[in-house]
Amino acid sequence: MKATEEEGRVSHPTAKKALKGILEKSEESCLQLRKPARLGVGKTVTVAERNDYLWTKSDGTIDLERTIGELKRF
């Protein structure tokens, strides 16, 4: 999930506030979002991420229907 500011850059306090709110909602909704390795500042900032959203079939290919269903939860 990304945070942006209409004018200028996303400050560190703004990013931390967004992260706190997103992680609280994530926990309530069982979305399993987490803080990125580095919380930066800039015009657009990643404030939460999830890496384990891909579902695979028994043959190792991506199960698009299940993956899309998982992404729709967001």
Image: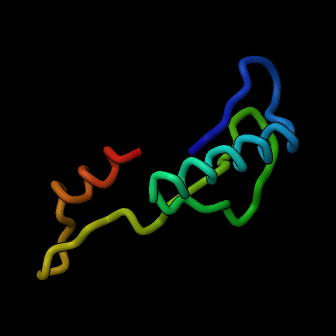
Q: Is residue 11 above or below residue 64?
A: above
> How many numbered markers are drawn?
0
Residue for point 73% across, 25% down: 5
Residue for point 81% across, 43% down: 41
**Quadrant of the rendering where the N terminus is positioned:** top right
Q: Is residue 2 above or below residue 40?
A: above
In the image, taking residue 41 as reference, residue 55 lies left or right, namely left
Position in image of residue 20 (x %, y %): 72, 49
In the image, taking residue 46 as reference, residue 51 lies left or right, namely left
Position in image of residue 50 (x %, y %): 50, 61
Quarter residue 49 falls in: bottom right
Residue for point 72% across, 18% down: 6
Residue placed most toward the observer, 23 or 64? 23
Q: Is residue 3 above or below residue 16?
A: above
The single residue placed furthest to the top in the displayed view is: 7
Quarter residue 4 falls in: top right
Residue placed most toward the observer, 26 or 53? 26
Q: Is residue 8 above or below residue 16?
A: above
Position in image of residue 15 (x %, y %): 77, 43
In the image, taking residue 18 as reference, residue 63 lies left or right, namely left
Position in image of residue 42 (x %, y %): 79, 38
In the image, taking residue 57 as reference, residue 25 lies left or right, namely right
**Quadrant of the rendering where the C terminus is positioned:** top left
